[in-house]
Image: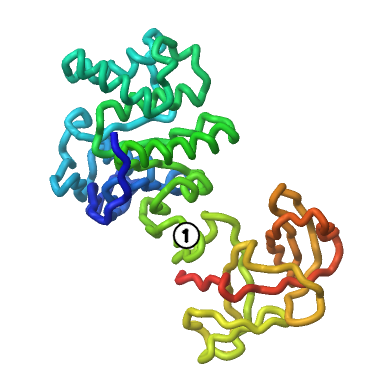
Amino acid sequence: MTSASSSPEPILSIDGLTKTFGPVTAVDRVSLDIRRNEFFALLGPSGCGKTTLLRMLAGFEAPSGGRILLDGKDISGLPPERRPLNLMFQSYALFPHMTVAKNLAYGLEMDRLPKAEIARRVEEIMAVTDLAGFADRKPDQLSGGQKQRVALARALVKRPKVLLLDEPLGALDKKLRERMQLELKRLQHDVGITFIIVTHDQEEALSISDRIVVMNAGKADQIGTPFEIYNRPTTRFVASFVGTLNVLDAVVADQAAGLVRIGDQTVAIKEAIPAANGATIQLAMRPEAGTLAATEGSTVKGQVTSSQFLGSVIRTRIDLGGKTLSFDTFNDPSATPPTVGSTIGVKIDPTGLILLAD
């Protein structure tokens, strides 16, 4: 298997895909293109439609409307076994009585491939997934991370055009999950296959994906790179779901010039302001878009309500005029974190302010 980079050419096109269960619309006219050799994430809270969408791609749910095109061909009506896609479940679903090698060979045997071809493919995929020394072990002799790699290898050994992953790391503890995220990204690069992952974990989606669709109430709220989703959210839902969000009250100082006042600080925002001078609008900002400063000068002043040490970052919560906002600063071993009850200033970085469309 050879490495490959993501191509702008779509391998999978979802066109107005809809799924209803009685009066409930689980997926609502979703349209998006997924590129060849791309690591694509379906991100959203429970009940947003992401798993239903994945099951329609796999063929386990029939669409109520819309089409699924793979390499330009409509596969919406094909059963799962006739689609060149493989779905890896969160539970792994390994055969407990079979060795690792037998688990990997099973699907190829069902396809009636020659024994020599099966042996070659199994050996190849074990090398790619670092399982070469585990061929004769059974699942109960493997760690959680090793079982996850076997499940991945079993899905990849059939060489699908697209690999579908339904919360594949959800059963792992935090440290192992972070390590396996890097493994997933490495594997996807090495095998050169399009990966589509369903996850509710925003950090996971941001760290391993080339692009993300954020799902909300069955709809695709926003599609973009992790950088775009985090730094340039286009809806209030995306901004609040992905990362921590602060909402600030700002007074329009000069609509034409794009100037607003936040406390004692006047800042310019890039977007057109949809309000007249003197009106109060709401702006969003991430915790890292504010710098803690002395109370003198052009700052927003508030009282520290909590200071949380998170290792590399210190998260300080400050009451600013009745609103508690969070601000992150890098840990400085030579500096003492702010004390609860003290008054502190915050200097706002205007480039970090977000004016949401909704």
Q: Is residue 68 above or below residue 251?
A: above
Above or below, 141 relative to 151: above
Q: Between residues 260 and 20, which one lies in front from this camera angle?
A: 260
Q: Quadrant of residue 193?
A: top left
Residue at the outermost left position: 73
Q: Quadrant of the N terminus?
A: top left
Q: Position of residue 89 (x, y in %)?
A: 39, 29
The structure residue drawn at horizontal position 20% and vertical position 15%, both measured from the top left corner, is 116
Residue in view at x 74 percent, y 55 percent: 331
Q: Quadrant of residue 156?
A: top left
Q: Residue at x 71, y 48 (%)?
A: 310
Q: Residue 279: percent from the left, percent from the top?
A: 59, 85
**What residue is at 40 percent from the left and 47 percent from the top?**
41
Give the SS element for disc 1: helix
Q: Is residue 29 visible?
A: no
| Residue for badge 1 | 227
Residue 121 in the image: x percent, y percent? Answer: 27, 22
Q: Is residue 257 above or below residue 98?
A: below
Query: With respect to residue 305, does 309 lie above or below?
Result: above
- Type of amino acid at the residue the image marks with label 1: Phe
Left or right of residue 316: residue 160:
left
In the depicted view, which residue is nearer to us: 235 or 70? 70
> Would residue 107 appear left or right of 166 to someone viewing this image?
left
Q: Nearer the viewer, residue 202 or 116?
A: 116
- The image position of residue 23, as x and y in percent, is 32, 46
Left or right, 200 with reference to 22: right
Instruction: Tell me if I can see residue 242 in this picture.
Output: yes
